[in-house]
Image (spheres, grey):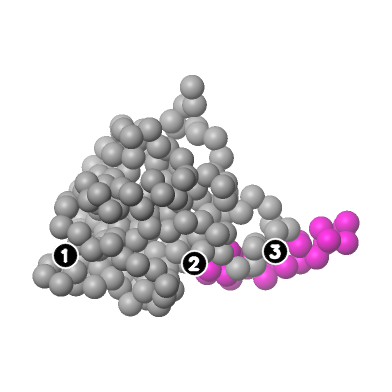
Amino acid sequence: MTNSYNPTPLTRDNAALVLVDNQVGLMTGVRDYPIAELKHNIVGLAKAAQALGLPIVTTTTSSQTLWGPAIPELTEALPDQTFIDRTTVNAWDDPRVEEAIRATGRTKLIFAGLSLEVCAAFPAMRAVREGFEAYVAVDASGTFNATKRETALVRLTQAGVVVADGASLMIEILADNASVDAGPVYGALGMDWSVLVGQVRESARHGV
């Protein structure tokens, strides 16, 4: 049996990204991350997942009456994406969300959401109970105070969810810096030194 704290590697064929409730109203309450940095991490995660060809599921909660629309930076990054708007607290409890997740056919699910302790954590923990391997990109999942962040991380680990930063998860999936997707992935993540990836790829191509 696979140790939940040391699962088999993420790949392009086994992973999907689930972005939960990255909404304008929730973003205004975030206190554990600078807003600009958090938006950068969320959008970078989404763009890197796109570059790797991962299925992406996106949701909002009561966007017309409660938390407002998805942040414009994310909708701009995912212009063809449908955001499933729901009322359930746990995204997984909405049959459309569960169906969309299962329809990806992937066994490893990467979650990120606002807030960390509810929007990201609840469906991630449910995923584990449903037999999936779940990951939470904590740097793309803001919350409202330090206590919420600290207790969320403890609860997630207790539940068998792997916690990591989004860039590390995407680079694990990339797997090879000589891949043609390396430049787009590093660029999406906003790594200034990603120009070096092109040099690695050229060296590999010429057998250096």
Q: Secondary structure at mark 2?
A: helix
Left or right of residue 37, residue 175 in this image: right
Residue at the image point whose x is 41% and y is 75% from the top: 79
Say which label, 3 or 1, has the lower sequence index.
1
What kind of residue is marked 3? Val
- Regarding mark 1 in the picture, which secondary structure is present there? loop
Q: Secondary structure at mark 3?
A: loop
Q: Amino acid at mark 1?
A: Ser
Q: Residue at x 22, y 51 (%)?
A: 94
Between discs 2 and 1, the one toward the N terminus: 2
Q: Residues within 10 Å of mark 1 (few under 14, many from 20)?
A: some
Left/right of residue 17 with respect to residue 21 in the rendered view = right
In space, the residues marked 3 and 1 are separated at their CA atoms by 39 Å
Q: Position of residue 34 (x, y in %)?
A: 32, 68
* Residue denoted by label 3: 180
Spatial distance from mark 3 to mark 2, Cα to Cα? 15 Å
Q: Nearer the viewer, residue 26 or 193?
A: 26
- Please tell me the numbered disc located at residue 100: none
Position above or below: 208 against 184: above
Q: Position of residue 201 (x, y in %)?
A: 76, 62
User: In terms of image quadrants, where is residue 162?
Assistant: top left
Residue 83 at x, y = what percent?
A: 31, 66
The span picked out in magenta is 185-208
* Residue 62, disc: 1
Name the front one of labels 2 and 1: 1
Which residue in the structure is indicated by mark 2? 47
| Residue 91 coordinates in the image, percent (x, y) | 25, 51
154 in relation to 83, above or below = above
Main secondary-structure element of the magenta-colored stretch:
helix
Picture quadrant where residue 195 is located = bottom right
